[in-house]
Image: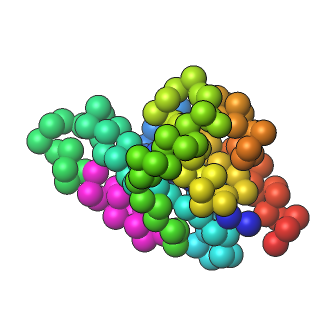
């Protein structure tokens, strides 16, 4: 099984234990990363997510600390076993954007990238990815843990 990890899941993994709001999601996301790192669940992370993690840090932390803090948290992510997907080419974006009619256009590159990388699921907490289910399924980490348990 190949999964695409959306930024909403990555941010919970990196910052969830430090946030009361996300703390309830952290155990499932931590288990998901355990499956990726120890059980060989094939995960894709795109450069779009790396940029979005940096943007999250920029909104959350003082300007003087953003570079160091984002590097520290991204180093945690880069200790995980995942395949890094690059940015889409202009042609890929133009060719596939009409397939993914999404409310939040900033998520369109994620959906296209997951599709082009032949992922089985986009793992996300963003419900608007459900609009892509006719092309690629979207589910939350808890659902992937259940599915991988049956398949693995």
**Over which residues does the magenta segment extend?**
70-80
Please provide percent x and percent y for residue 28.
Answer: 66, 51
Image point (47%, 61%), residue name: 85
Query: Magenta segment, principal secondary structure?
Result: helix
Classify residue 138 by image quadrant.
Answer: top right
Image point (66%, 75%), residue name: 40
Q: Nearer the viewer, residue 152 or 102?
A: 102
**Is residue 3 visible to us here?**
no
Question: Quadrant location of the C terminus?
Answer: bottom right
49 on left or right of 32: left
Please provide percent x and percent y for residue 15.
Answer: 43, 46
Classify residue 52 by image quadrant.
Answer: top left
Q: Is residue 77 magenta?
A: yes
Please provide percent x and percent y for residue 81.
Answer: 52, 72
Q: Which of 44 and 134 is in front in this view?
A: 134
Q: Nearer the viewer, residue 51 or 96?
A: 96
């Amino acid at each position: 099984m190949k999964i695409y990890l959306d930024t909403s899941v990555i941010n919970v993994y990196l910052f969830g234990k430090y946030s009361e709001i996300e703390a309830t999601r952290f155990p499932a996301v931590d288990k998901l990363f355990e499956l990726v790192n120890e059980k060989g669940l094939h995960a894709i992370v795109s450069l779009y997510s790396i940029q979005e993690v940096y943007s999250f840090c920029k909104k959350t932390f003082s300007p003087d600390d953003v570079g160091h803090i984002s590097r520290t948290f991204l180093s945690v992510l880069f200790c995980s076993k995942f395949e890094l997907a690059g940015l889409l080419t202009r042609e890929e974006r133009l060719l596939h954007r009409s397939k993914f009619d999404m409310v939040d256009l900033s998520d369109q590159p994620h959906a296209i990238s997951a599709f082009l990388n032949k992922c089985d699921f986009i793992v996300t907490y963003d419900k608007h990815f459900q609009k892509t289910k006719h092309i690629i399924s979207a589910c939350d980490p808890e659902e992937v843990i259940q599915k991988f348990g049956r398949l693995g």
